[in-house]
Image (cartoon, rainbow, N blue to C red):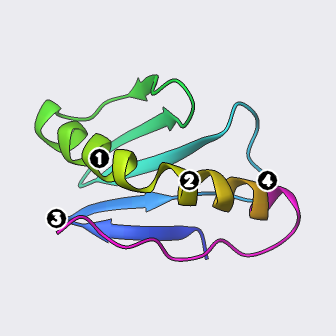
Amino acid sequence: MPEVSRFYGIIILMFADDHNPPHFHVRYGNKRAVISIKNSVVTGQMSRKELIKVFEWMDLHKDEIMENWNRLKNGQEPLPIEPLI
């Protein structure tokens, strides 16, 4: 299952067969974005309000997000990450 966290209607996903650089996917309604873990580059469309929440979550869980990326690259399932509350 690629979903690793969900908060305020925002869904964070990571996929085993994804390409480098390390990143995660964000869905909010019909908006989609990809965020690079190391340099926080955003590709896609997401409102500023939601991106602020995603970056707050990312700051709290950056090590866990990177651990999940490594787990996926090693053929393991990602672990759930606490939502932003």
Residue 20 shown left or right of residue 74 in the figure? left
Mark 4 vs 1: CB contact within 8 A: no
Identify the element where label 3 is drawn: loop
Mark 4 and mark 1 lie on one chain; the one further toward the N terminus is 4
Foreground mark, 4 or 3?
Answer: 3
Q: Amino acid at mark 1?
A: Val
Disc number lying in front (4 or 2)? 2
Residue highlighted by disc 1: 54
Q: The disc labelled 4 sits on which kind of residue?
A: Asp
Upstream in sequence: badge 3 or badge 2:
3
Picture quarter with the N terminus: bottom right
**Residue 57 coordinates in the image, percent (x, y):** 31, 53
Q: Residue at x 54, y 37 (%)?
A: 37
Residue stretch in magenta = 72-85
Circle 3 residue: 8
Residue behind mark 4: 17
Tell me: residue 35, above or below residue 82.
above
Residue 62 is situated, as x and y percent measured from the top left of the image, at 49, 49
Mark before the other along the chain sequence, 3 or 1: 3
Element marked by disc 1: helix
